Amino acid sequence: MTGLIYLVGILTTLFIVYLTVEFIWNRVPSGALVDAHQAAPQAGSRLQSALTPLGVPVQKYAPPPMIRKVEADLYWAQMAGKWVGWNAVQFIALQVAAAVGGIVGGMILTSALPMALMAGYFGWSYPGMSAGGVARRTRRKFVSQLPEFIQLVSAQMSAGISMEEAFTRTAKTPGLVGEWMRMVIRQSQGRNLIEQMQREAQASLLPELIGMSVQLSFIRNGSARQELMSQMAMGIAAGYIGAAEQRAEKLGSEMIVPMVLFYFVPFMVTILTIVGYPVVIGLFGGVK
């Protein structure tokens, strides 16, 4: 009975943390891609202000690779209209606050340290899973649209226009890449467009985008630019197809454990219960 009380308490704590993160901390309006990168006041500004005292220790003690990864995840999550207005330091501070809140709430509700630590781990992990999941889906969608976008730029360049003008015209097309390019064009006013693309690619930590921006700097100063652009598009498409095939191959092996745990084991328990119960009653039911 005591274990059941602990279980109900920890599930209640996890549910409260989930609702807080999903509907309060992550409650931001979705809008255009350009708006996602502007520092306008958002709905979570009060919470961000409350997390300000944690900013200094986070900047001091958080590993730089962690901050860089969080920055990249937020970059792509904000493209999808999530976690708008948050930066890496605020996000990690939020994880710390959620972890502490989970531990405290778990101790109050269950008085069991293992359950409290579990709630704290969930509080730390859930914001990262929320932003990381959105970022991962946005990256894949972006990469899937990138080859077609480059092909359109190459087709524009076949008419004899400059690379910058071709990108500007192609940016008017719908899609995530077109929105990203419009943002780059907006931010590159008075500066070189290719260099701005390189800066955004470095901020995104997307290998395909980084490679494309580096190749564009060489293609711009070389000859046969249209052919090179077509080759680059085919290379990006081949890389995306290869990565998709690898994910499909891994999916089968990764699904074995969930299938065993959530399908085979409950199935066997149910069958053994249905079949074994009458047998046990028949053998031992009359024994006093």
Image (cartoon, grey):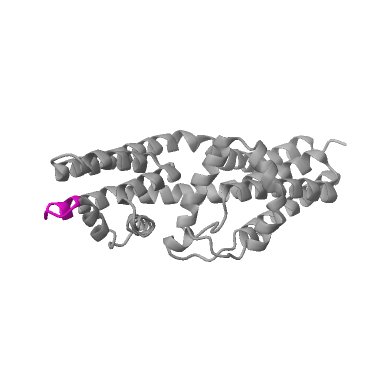
Residue 141 shows in this picture: yes
Answer with the quarter of the image where residue 269 lies: top right
Answer with the quarter of the image where residue 225 lies: top left
Magenta span covers which residues? 154-162
Report the front residue among 202 and 238. Answer: 202
Work out whether 68 lies above or below 23: above
Residue depicted at 77% across the width and 47% down the height: 7
Residue depicted at 34% across the width and 46% down the height: 195
Q: For this view, does 56 lie left or right of residue 187? A: right
**Percent position of residue 244, x then y:** 36, 40
Residue depicted at 20% across the width and 41% down the height: 221
Report the front residue among 130 and 210. Answer: 210
**Percent position of residue 138, x then y:** 43, 51
Report the front residue among 85 and 262. Answer: 85
**Percent position of residue 130, x then y:** 56, 51
Q: How many marks?
A: 0
**Percent position of residue 237, x then y:** 27, 43
Q: For this view, does 151 lie left or right of residue 159? A: right
Residue furthest right as drawn: 288
Magenta highlight on residue 158: yes
Magenta highlight on residue 227: no
Residue depicted at 46% across the width and 33% down the height: 253
Q: For this view, does 174 lie left or right of residue 206? A: left
Report the front residue among 143 and 247. Answer: 143
Residue furthest front as drawn: 190
Work out whether 260 lies above or below 86: above
Residue 275 shows in this picture: no
Answer with the quarter of the image where residue 120 lies: top right
Work out whether 19 lies above or below 54: below
Q: For this view, does 239 lie left or right of residue 265? A: left
- The quarter of the picture where the C terminus appears is top right
